[in-house]
Image (tube, grey):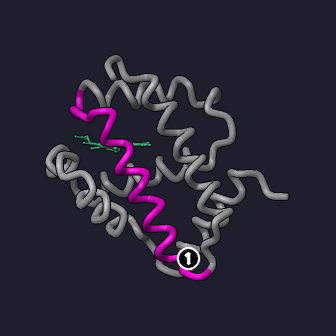
């Protein structure tokens, strides 16, 4: 049986095969869900947005976040103090990622996949949330 991270990796490679780079689709859905994030990100070019998504995909395929402790501490601190990102902005972000993957996978999307995606995104979101200095 596949681990959670294998399932995520398989979905992402299927999405890439079918739809290519879905970065812009994800941000479009995200900004509809969370207009305040669009303001915070309005100055970013496609290259930075793409780099950010690469890191998000990488983290979604990590099995144990203990090994990412230093990176997560550093990245969350940057987002909070330098980029003015608020903890609630991560909720809509992960929902937009799941909505985009579900849309591309179409009939191959299953309730079991939904559960894996929801649980992995929640795991990463809570790793991020607990590193914010304020709630
Ligand atoms: C797992 C979640 C996230 C990860 C791993 C992540 C990672 C990154 C990375 C690696 C960059 C730097 C890109 C570069 O210049 O090389 C970046 C930039 C940025 N991220 Fe995120 N990000 C996440 C979620 C978010 C969310 C939810 C927001 C909400 C608004 C956000 C806002 C920004 C902004 C504003 C920048 C650009 C900062 C600047 O250069 O001015 N990020 N992110």
Percent position of residue 83, x then y: 23, 34
Percent position of residue 70, x then y: 52, 23
Percent position of residue 123, x then y: 57, 39
Q: Quadrant of ligand 1?
A: top left
For the N terminus, the image quarter is bottom right
Q: Most extreme residue toward the front, as rendered?
A: 111
Residue at left offset 35%, top offset 50%: 92
Q: Is residue 115 above or below residue 90?
A: below
Q: Most extreme residue toward the top, as rendered?
A: 133
In the shown orientation, is residue 115 left or right of residue 88?
A: right
Q: Is residue 112 above or below residue 56?
A: below
Q: Closest to the observer: 10 or 86?
A: 86
- Magenta: main secondary structure equals helix
Residue 106 colored in magenta in the image: yes
Q: Closest to the observer: 128 or 43?
A: 128
In the shown orientation, is residue 1 left or right of residue 119?
A: right
The residue stretch that appears in magenta: 82-107
Residue 12, by quadrant, is: bottom right
For the C terminus, the image quarter is top left
Q: Is residue 114 above or below residue 85?
A: below
Residue topped by disc 1 = 105
Residue at left offset 48%, top offset 60%: 98
Q: How many discs mark residues in the rendered view?
A: 1
> Dot 1: what SS?
helix
Q: Most extreme residue toward the right, as rendered?
A: 1
Residue 117, by quadrant, is: bottom right
Q: Closest to the observer: 119 or 48?
A: 119
Percent position of residue 88, x then y: 32, 37
């Amino acid at each position: 049986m596949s681990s959670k991270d294998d399932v995520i990796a398989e979905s992402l490679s299927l999405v890439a095969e079918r739809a290519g780079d879905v970065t812009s689709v994800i941000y479009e859905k995200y900004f509809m869900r969370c207009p305040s994030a669009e303001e915070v990100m309005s100055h970013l070019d496609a290259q930075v947005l793409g780099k950010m998504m690469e890191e998000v995909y990488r983290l979604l395929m990590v099995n144990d976040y203990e090994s990412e402790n230093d990176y997560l501490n550093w990245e969350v601190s940057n987002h909070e103090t330098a980029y003015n990102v608020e903890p609630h902005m991560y909720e809509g972000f992960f929902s937009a990622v799941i909505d985009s993957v579900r849309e591309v996978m179409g009939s191959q999307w299953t309730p079991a996949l939904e559960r894996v995606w929801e649980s992995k995104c929640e795991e990463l979101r809570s790793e991020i949330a607990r590193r914010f200095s304020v709630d």
